[in-house]
Image: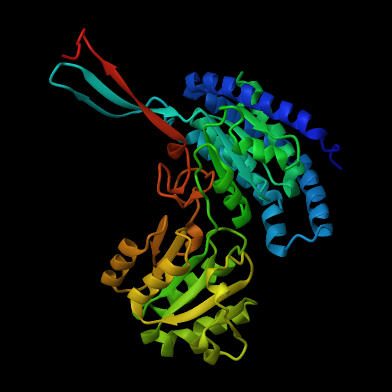
Amino acid sequence: MTAPLKTIEGSGEIAATMQDIGRQAKAAARVLALASADQKNRALAGMAAAIRAGKSGILSANADDLAEGKTGGLTAAMLDRLTLNDQRVEAMAEGLDVVRGLADPVGKVTESWTRPNGMTIERVKVPLGVVGVIYESRPNVTADAGALTLKAGNAVILRGGSDSHRSSRAIHAALTKGLREANLPEAAISLVPTRDRAAVGMMLQGLDGAIDVLVPRGGKSLVGRVQTEARVPVFAHLEGVCHVYVDKAAALDMAKTIVMNAKLRRTGVCGAAETLLVDRAAAATHLQPLIEMLLDAGCEVRGDAAVQKADARVKPASEADWSTEYLDAIITAGVVDGVDAAIEHIERYGTHHTDAIVTADQQAAEKFLNEVDSAIVLHNASTQFADGGEFGFGAEIGIATGKLHARGPVGVEQLTSFKYRVRGTGQIRP
């Protein structure tokens, strides 16, 4: 059993604690902005080692969270997101190792030029400052967010979900150990020590200017609250109503493989396919095999009239189903009139997250890739590749579905801003 959760009683004590966390994080950010790549990498190496050494404690804490979650009625999808095992703990440690191996973006000069008056101007990458991350369920986000923000020279304030509080604390203890070993401030990665939602509200207000950007990672209600109440910039991570469109020129075997993986590899991830669209011109050959495959694999299918005719086990799809992120073994399926109709459907019901086309027609593929307005669009590949690790980013802090600053997987590069360094020899402006 893990130690009892630390509690903070009363709004006054919560406010005082959060303000202190904000002040310390801001001070830590100034140190991190000047830390060498070697020092940050030593911290990351220590974190990975501490996670591996502390695996039994992390799994014990997670078992307590799971037991409480089951008693509290968490869905199967939420329990899957919450669950840690040997492989997932090792994956966290490996993620830290990968981030350690990435190039340090801080101080990188991306552009430079000389003006006619002789002044030289450089555009150089700098940390954002203090990042606030508010997330639900997934305890691995604690390690991913801590590693990525540190590598980019930022301090981070983490507010994990109430259901993963014990797991996050155990992981955070390993991260803190790595910071100490590298002689970096422990406040570089802070974990909010209360489940009280008042702490979230205080983060949304920015903690008196301490927080420079917020990253929400969770369900529609969480992201909606953050977008409504935040007084600092937000990297929005909306729900993933992801589509797979099977075009008339799709090879059936490839389509079956991609659809099966996109939907059922892990149903609880944001890149899981929630809607299957099949070209009407391919319905006679492709629709029934795809629907039967999903049903036989234990996936509930909710479909339009054409899909219902393909298999008696299909349930009728409601209007709400087309815009639902199930995060479960459920998919909505429909027949559309070609790639243009598929694009229109995705624009109407999608969330600009991740969408895929399966086709051998290069022209149709390019049209889909160019016209679908999502953060990630794929041709002949599973939507479950919507992941920073799969993009070579080492890990991700979330999938940004907005259009400002960062879009798609938010990794080390996206957690930096820039400034201009101008060097002169006495120039003045006439």
Name the quarter where the N terminus is drawn. top right
Look at the picture and state if 207 lies above or below 283.
Answer: above
Q: Can you see residue 148?
A: yes
Q: Position of residue 225 (x, y in %)?
A: 60, 49
Q: In this rendered view, identify the residue nearer to me: 111 or 202.
A: 202
Look at the picture and state if 305 lies above or below 382.
Answer: below
Q: Can you see residue 8?
A: no
Q: In this view, does 416 lie to the left or right of 172?
A: left
| Residue name at image x 78 percent, y 53 percent | 66
Q: Position of residue 279 (x, y in %)?
A: 39, 81
Q: Quadrant of residue 414?
A: top left
| Residue name at image x 30 percent, y 72 percent | 364
Look at the picture and state if 110 lies above or below 266.
Answer: above
| Residue name at image x 60 percent, y 91 percent | 312
Q: Is residue 179 left or right of residue 3?
A: left
Q: In which quarter of the image is residue 302?
A: bottom right
Q: Position of residue 167 (x, y in %)?
A: 74, 43
